[in-house]
Image (cartoon, helix red, strand yellow):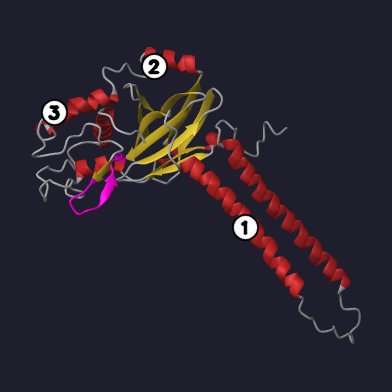
Amino acid sequence: MWENFPLLPKRASSFAPEVDALYGFLVGVSLFFIALIFLLITVFAIKYRRRSEAEVPPPVRGSLALEITWIVIPLGIVLVVFGWGAVLYFKMYGPAPKEALEVYVVGKQWMWHIQHPTGQREINELHVPAGRPIKLTMATEDVIHSFYIPDFRVKKDVVPGRYTTLWFEATQPGRYRFFCAEYCGTKHSEMGGWVIVMDPVEYQNWLGSGGASAPTESLAQAGERLFQQLACHTCHREDTQELGPSLRGLFGRSVRLADGRTVVADEAYLRESILNPDAKIVAGFSSPSVMPTYQGQITEEQLLQLVAYLKSLGGEQR
């Protein structure tokens, strides 16, 4: 019966059972107190009903034990829910495992453009292997979108001007719907697609066959080509660092800035430095920076290619 009328979507990721357990606890606690309050109202209404017109109810005296009870029990339940939810939140939205397969996603009205590190491109489809963590690095070319996979119990907003990340581990092969969960325009309802979870061997065969599109170069190779086309290599040279710092081994490393601060060279830092070179100038280099801004000159997809290339130059993976 419940197969045709499921209360919840399928559980198809490692997060799904834990999210459902917390949700079930919240529903169970709510139902328990609804029943308890209904029962007490009924009992008190009968027991303390007025029996005659002349009856005067006795004065109500306070009870310290009762007041402590109805403070301590709800407080304990709230703390349990808070602690449980916080642990689950940091597990889901914390850093992805180092062995995670990274896939790049760009949202735009009204489609999802997806590219694998080896160059395969997809539109509104995402092929992933089962049993391996998948990290999505996401950007948007226009408005706020939100990448939502109900069967995996994961959702993350995709915000203009920044990268957001999401990770999951699919547990069983199959086809699972994903949606945009943020109203993004008149055709918002059409902005969805499928996650195709494959057996690892089948996934490798899919990659080897070229996937949805036969790639001519990987994402990092496309970024390297763009890096040369934009003449970035003329300043970011390794033999001399007069105009720009070396980028080899930069990703994930701490960078000391001209204003004394220290930042980590993650995806967000690389993106900001490409679009707004004066935002965080590296210590020892001129301010304002001699580097021109590439805001409006390259697309989000090209930005992801450049970031993938810079990450391929080495550094601590994050």
Q: Quadrant of residue 82?
A: bottom right
Disc 1 marks which residue? 78
Q: Secondary structure at mark 2?
A: helix
Of the 4 image quadrants, the one containing the C terminus is top left
Q: Nearer the viewer, residue 34 or 53?
A: 34
Q: What residue would you read off at disc 3?
A: 229
Q: Position of residue 123 (x, y in %)?
A: 37, 27
Disc with the residue nearer the chain's start (2 vs 3): 2
Three-letter code for the amino acid on which mark 3 is drawn: Gln
How far from the left and from the top, in percent, is residue 151?
Answer: 55, 34
Tell me the distance, in whole angstroms, between the alpha carbons under discs 1 and 2. 47 Å
The local crowd at label 2, few if under 14, some if 14 to 19, many if 20 or more residues have their Cα within 10 Å, is some
Q: Of callouts 1 and 3, which one flags the residue occurring earlier in the amino acid sequence? A: 1
Q: Residue visible at 71% across and 69% down?
A: 68
The structure residue drawn at horizontal position 35% and vertical position 46%, both measured from the top left corner, is 159
Q: Find out whether the residues at labels 1 and 3 contact each other: C-beta distance under 8 Å.
A: no
What's the CA distance linking mark 2 and mark 3? 28 Å
Task: Estimate the x, y position of residue 95 in percent, counting from the top left.
Answer: 43, 39
User: Mark 3: few, some, or many residues within 10 Å (few <14, many ≥20)?
Assistant: few
| Residue 290 picture quarter | top left
Camera-near label (1 vs 2) is 1
In this rendering, position of residue 115 left or right of residue 167: left
**Foreground residue among 222 and 243:** 243
Looking at numbered disc 2 in the image, what kind of residue is underneath it?
A: Leu
Per the image, the residue denoted by label 2 is: 207
Q: Is residue 262 above or below residue 240?
A: below
Q: Quadrant of the N terminus?
A: top right
Report the span colored magenta: 256-267
- The amino acid sitting under disc 1 is Val
Image mark for residue 132:
none
Secondary structure under tag 1 reads helix
Question: Which residue does the image show at 39% across and 39% down from the upper left?
Answer: 165
